[in-house]
Image: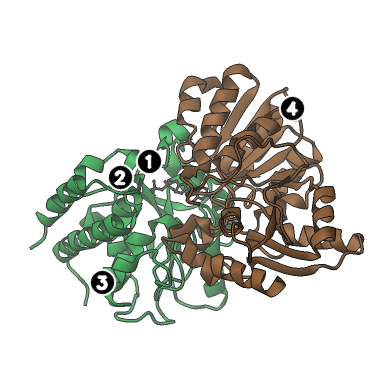
Chain colours: A green, B brown
Amino acid sequence: MALSTSDLKKLSWQLRADLLDMVYQNDGHLGGPLSSLDILNTIYFSDIFKFSKKSPKPTDDNFILSAGHLATALYVVLAHKLYFDKKKLATFSHFKSILEGHVSTTVPGVSYSSGSLGQGLSFAAGLALGNLLDKKNKFTLCLTSDGEHQEGQTWEAAMFASKYKLKNLINIVDHNKYQIDGSLEDIMPLDDLAQKYISFGWTVKEVDGHDYKKLLKIFQISKLSNYPTCIIAHTTFAKGVSFAHFDYKYHDLKNLDPTLYQLAKNEISKHLN
Amino acid sequence: MKSVNTSIRQSFGATLFKLAKTNKNIYVVDADLKSSLYLSEFAKVFPKRFIEVGVAENNAASVAAGLAKTGKTVFLTSFSCFSPAINWAVIRQSICYNNSNVKIIGSHSGLMSGSLGATHQMLEDIALMQVLPNMEVFSPADAIETAKIVSAVSRSPKPSYIRLVRPDTPAFFPPKLSFTIGKSQILTKGNITLLFHGPIGHLAFNLSNTKENSLEIINCSSIKPLDSKTILKSIKKTGKLIVLEDHQKIGGLGQAVSSLLLENKLAPRFIHLAVDNQFGRSSKDYSKLYDHYGIGIKALKLAVKKLN
Ligand SMILES: Cc1ncc(C[n+]2csc(CCOP(=O)(O)OP(=O)(O)O)c2C)c(N)n1
């Protein structure tokens, strides 16, 4: 059963709470996973795309996480999807845990292992092409970060998807405007990202990446395109933990101060129940 | 002997900063990893000599090569799983074939990357780099040797690769020893020759104190050019060899040494402790990985026992 906008919103705070605990206990990325969470939640918990409950099925749509360091966000979503026991979240990046430090196919529901940026959109394009050739009625969704649009390969994929008219390919860009060492503006500006995708022959939509109503609508529309679709989701870095918003120091956490953890937890908890 | 842990990456950043104060020709081309490589200070004090390309390792390698052709000594900084891994063919052409004065700094090498998992545990970098004509390859044992190697390559006009690691590691390189390109150092004398490169050598160093573990430990931080003379001399004497490295067996130091041995008609008893044709995996504590992949203290003790 599909979740309503308000159900999705409610769930998103539970996901954030679990993500925070996971990262607090074991280190890992925070800013990007929190900014991409509402997008992932919409993909997996609305009924716009097919992602089976409890265990993934071969007939499900494809999802590719290109930016492998966002693993924690996908892991909490898949845990809530009941693909594996939620208790396992506490073992993130431990020896012999299925939850590898960067996204890995050892986790049920993950179909691409990654950690090196810039390759996922090409992989997704290959999947989408295969499905088209086999006349499989399936969508391939790919989540890319804005930082990985600095990699040339991302644009090679964009060109390719256009040539092969991959109308079953949807790339969602988590456009949080930050990367490891600063803002994209300072490190390497992307300028007008939408215009770039348009000139590569894609259908382009821009959306507030935390507004469920709008996300649902955009995803619906993108299924109807005759071209590959790029959804540029404008997001807030570290969304939900205000002291970390727009602060690239929280890109990657090591030994988060317990008082800051409590502060973050309190802020998130306010939205629960 | 318990040694303190120090940061190889921090030593790199601090050394380069120090060198750059007097050598105005030193430039950095970075791919969104300056804080991880301790280059924030460099970027702040020498903004004109710090070039940020973003997450774009292919572009970075050719930009660095072009910049070097204007008479500069360029340090290309990233993690080894991205540079030289992603941009290998670019390094081959723009840097090696065109003989450009670029020093490739690849951090997060080996299983030592721990929790980050297989994608960030670069185990093939030595293989990729030592195969290239014109390229020199170095793997410092600790923070102290890192400083010495970075200084040495800054004075050479040749392309080189320096392999760094993520965690703080034991300081065991004798501070008074010097580093010379193409030379290895004998750290202890003994009955079994043990060759290593990188911080993993501390395992052997800790073991070498007792009588039953009489090791002739040779630090092969200069992997290319390799110090054949010192290595061959030791093996001729001992007739027993262990090579220990946090790298794939294929293409690592062990293979370079084995062809050297055959060419010189030597056939010592030989155990190569390296990762055998597998990808890494996550673990917060890398020593668990060392045991799992058979390059840890247990495997080393067993190898010594077998050769005794
Ligand atoms: C090819 C490659 N180069 C460098 C890195 C190191 N790295 C990890 S995350 C990151 C940048 C993060 O920025 P972005 O991709 O926009 O992610 P976000 O800020 O949303 O987490 C970098 C450079 C990498 N993973 N892959």
Give residue A169's position: percent from left, percent from top.
Answer: 47, 63
- Confirm or deny contact between disc 1 and disc 2 (CB under 8 A): yes
Residue type marked 4: Lys
Give residue B179's position: percent from left, percent from top.
Answer: 70, 37
Q: Chain of mark 2?
A: A
Q: Chain of mark 1?
A: A
Residue type marked 2: Phe
Q: Are marks 4 and 2 on the same chain?
A: no
Residue B280 shows in the view = no
Residue A80 numbered mark, or none = 3
Q: Secondary structure at mark 2?
A: loop
Q: Which residue does the numbered mark 1 point to in the structure image?
A: A178
Q: Chain of mark 4?
A: B
Give residue A218's position: percent from left, percent from top.
Answer: 31, 57
Q: Which residue does the numbered mark 4 point to in the structure image?
A: B69
Write the residue at 55% across / 24% down: B18
The residue carrying pointer 1 sits among few (fewer than 14), some (14 to 19) or many (20 or more) residues within 10 Å by Cα, namely many
Q: Chain of mark 3?
A: A
Q: Are marks 1 and 3 on the same chain?
A: yes
Give residue A249's position: percent from left, percent from top.
Answer: 34, 40
Residue A192 shows in the view = yes
Write the residue at 45% across / 35% down: A191
Distance between the Cα atoms at labels 1 and 2? 7 Å
Q: Which residue does the numbered mark 2 point to in the structure image?
A: A237
Q: Is mark 3 within 8 Å of ligand 1?
A: no
Q: Secondary structure at mark 3?
A: helix
Write the residue at 30% across / 38% down: A247
User: To which quarter of the image does residue A60 belong?
Assistant: bottom left
